[in-house]
Amino acid sequence: MRHILEITATDLKGEVEPIQFEYVGYDRFTGYGLVNAHKAVEYTRKHYLPADWNGDGNVETLDAALYLTDYTNADAMTDLNLDTIQTT
């Protein structure tokens, strides 16, 4: 979540001078900038992969195995549609 807020924040400083050794989006005076909640939610909606169980950005066999392990252990996170029943 923190990463998403950092990369979607509105930069308050604008262009960064090349001499400062700071990258665009972060500077020591204004940090990452102003939180842009709308942009963060839109980013999340476009990049959300519910099948990516381990959160590495790829949907693989390992994700299915991890989901099944959590499902077997009755982990609340396996309720993907939030109806209070584990999603099969």
Image (tube, rainbow, N blue to C red):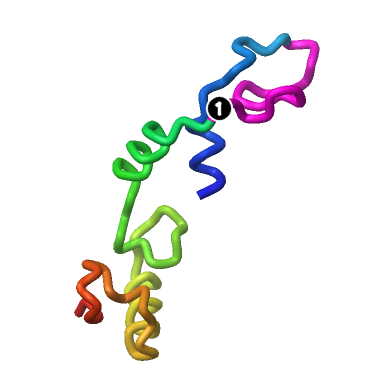
Rendered view: 46 above or below 56: above
The amino acid type found where label 1 is placed reads Leu
Q: Horizontal and vertical percent for residue 47? A: 34, 45
Magenta residues, start to end: 18-34
Total numbered badges shown on the rendered structure: 1
Q: Report the side of 60 relative to 4 (left or right).
A: left
Which quarter of the figure is the C terminus placed in?
Answer: bottom left
The rendered magenta stretch, by its main secondary structure, is classed as loop
Rendered view: 72 above or below 86: below
Task: Place residue 31 in its image quadrant.
Answer: top right
Task: Place residue 16 in its image quadrant.
Answer: top right
- Quick one: 34 or 20, which is closer to the camera? 34
Rendered view: 86 above or below 37: below
Q: Horizontal and vertical percent for residue 80? A: 26, 68
x 40%, y 77%: residue: 66
Q: Is the residue marked by circle 1 packed among few (<14), some (14-19), or many (20+) residues within 10 Å?
A: some
x 39%, y 32%: residue: 39
Task: Place residue 67 in its image quadrant.
Answer: bottom left
Q: Report the side of 58 relative to 28 (left or right).
A: left
For residue 70: magenta?
A: no
Q: Report the side of 19 relative to 34 (left or right).
A: right
Secondary structure type for disc 1? loop
For residue 29: magenta?
A: yes
Name the residue beneath numbered marker 1. 34
- Quick one: 17 or 75, which is closer to the camera? 75
x 42%, y 37%: residue: 40
x 46%, y 30%: residue: 36
